[in-house]
Image (cartoon, helix red, strand yellow):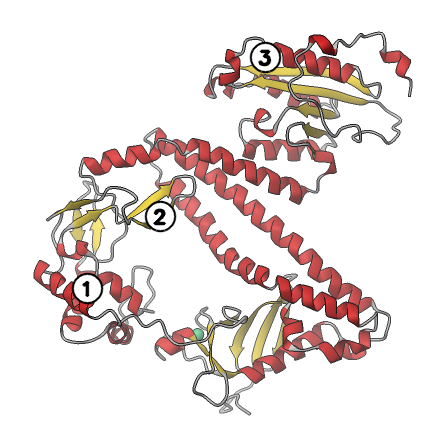
Amino acid sequence: MNHARVQEIPVQRSSVTVINQPVGWNDVNTQPRSKKLKVASYCRVSSEEELQLGSLENQIIHYTNYIRSNPDWYYAGVYSDKGKSGTDMSKRIGFNRMIRNAMNGEIDLIICKSISRFARNVVDTMDIVRQLTEKGIFVIFEKERLNTKDMTSSLLIKILATFAEEESRATSENIDWAFTKRFERGEVVAGQLFGYEVNKDKEWIIVEKEAEIVREAYDLFLNGYNMTEIARHFIRKGYKKRSGEIDWDNNNIRSILTNERYAGDVLSRKTCTLDFRTHKTVINRGHKPQYYIEDHHEGIVSKEDYEKVQEILRDNKSDFNRGDYEKTPFTSRVICTHCGKNFHRFGKNIKKTIWRCSSNVKSELLCEADPIEEEHIEKLLREGFEKRYNINRRTNDGLLIKQLTKELSTAEAVREREQNLLRVELEKCLIAENKAILQNLDTEVLKEKRQDVEKEIAIKAKLWEDFDKDYEFREASLNRLKELKGSDKAIKKILDISFMRAWVIHIKVESPFLFTIKWIDGKETVVGKFRGGHNDGRK
Ligand SMILES: [Zn+2]
């Protein structure tokens, strides 16, 4: 490398306002290269900084000198944009020109002060960085000390997801204020309420078929039935919830019996959204003002009946029976394939511990899944593990131990990546939704889209939570693998339920004889066999 060649361009750092001392890039291009890197920089000023006159000019001078003073770099230009507000930046002529030039092979490396200065938002940043990376073009973000070249894509996604959160926080201001104004004007933000439909003119219309079910719940309760009994009765009758399901439980009945809207009144803001960044709602216990509107719409039950029910509920708080199953590490891991609900463990007051489908516990009409003995679950799990890893045919080459160790460690990375991708997807929806709210546009479609993502996250979150809880089991299992000192044959000795658990995502129960085990790498093993006839699966 010939330093003399670049000395012809004098660098006058002292005359430049150094905005941010570049850090961590001495190591960027230390390895010898046959070709010099073509390096460009991108600068822009935000609205506040524009007040500091000359900020952009200083940045341009700084980066020009900085790039030119590196003997391993070719100067490929300093690109810039400026504007008074975010919308003025929408054209971003300089930025787009830089990306075009990069894609045409004129730039190998882009230096930018920070992630927030780069693309319009973090989601865009991600898309652009990915496109650049595919072409072998990398970006250095000075403030965050990131070089996209050094990063695995999953790490980059993780970092960008964090920044996306900050960004959507910024768009969520003012929305709360808009909602308060609507409540003050007496507008009711209608959710989906069983028994009613809201028409175009915002009028609440009674859905008679559902209203009958509501009235029946009040009648039965006033006649001495408890919530569990009412739920069972509804299941027997085959009454459908809004979701189309018939799996009523006492929580459903409780929410019918305690909702003042069935008596025609509205307590606005029973729940409130504390944070429009996440759109999470909580029960309003004085977080935000409440508004009570009497006779807002036609009631389904009389005010007298509603009040009588509330009195009984106040006197009798014990009618809140959540079942008596036991929580264990396998809770929500054993899934019924007939109804999709979980098996719960019942071990109290019974000789043998059994697992029962939770729908079946509510009513046999919902699901006819047979109970399973815990011993049997263990037995099939071991069978699955042995089958999957060919345990009986192992020699002592240590390959299995290596494989098992690798599986436990890569599983975490897969989970991280999956989560961060969904986080970015969610932030994208939130940003779009907040913008629409502020512009007073219809948000229904955006909301549905967000809820789809949230639903997906919620489903995955359950799996992730289970997976994370198993961290200790994975560690313990890894340690036990080490103890084997490379002897694959010895694995059989440690093959107990706590060891195997580290590999299990869930067990789907087809019948007490037939399971599908899903492992942490997403693969599945079927164990047991189809059996016809009268066997009940209990030995
Ligand atoms: Zn079931």
Q: Pinpoint residue 115: horizontal percent, then vertical percent.
A: 60, 29
> 525 left or right of 311?
right
Residue at (70% x, 56% y) in the render? 410
| Amino acid identity at mark 1 | Val
Any part of residue 215 in sight:
no
N-term mark: 3 or 2: 3
Q: How far apart are marks 1 and 3 (CA)?
A: 66 Å
Q: Do the residues labelled 3 and 2 touch (CB within 8 Å)?
A: no
Q: Nearer the viewer, residue 255 or 444?
A: 255
SS class of the residue under badge 2? strand
Q: Do the residues labelled 2 and 1 touch (CB within 8 Å)?
A: no
Label 3: which residue? 55
Any part of residue 292 in sight:
yes
Marks 1 and 3: which is nearer the front? 3
Task: Say whether mark 3 is within 8 Å of ligand 1.
Answer: no
Q: Nearer the viewer, residue 344 or 35?
A: 344
Residue at (69% x, 14% y) in the render? 62
Label 2: which residue? 281
N-term mark: 2 or 1: 1
Label 1: which residue? 214
Quadrant of the image occupied by residue 439: top left
| Amino acid identity at mark 2 | Thr
| Amino acid identity at mark 3 | Ser
> 108 left or right of 142?
right
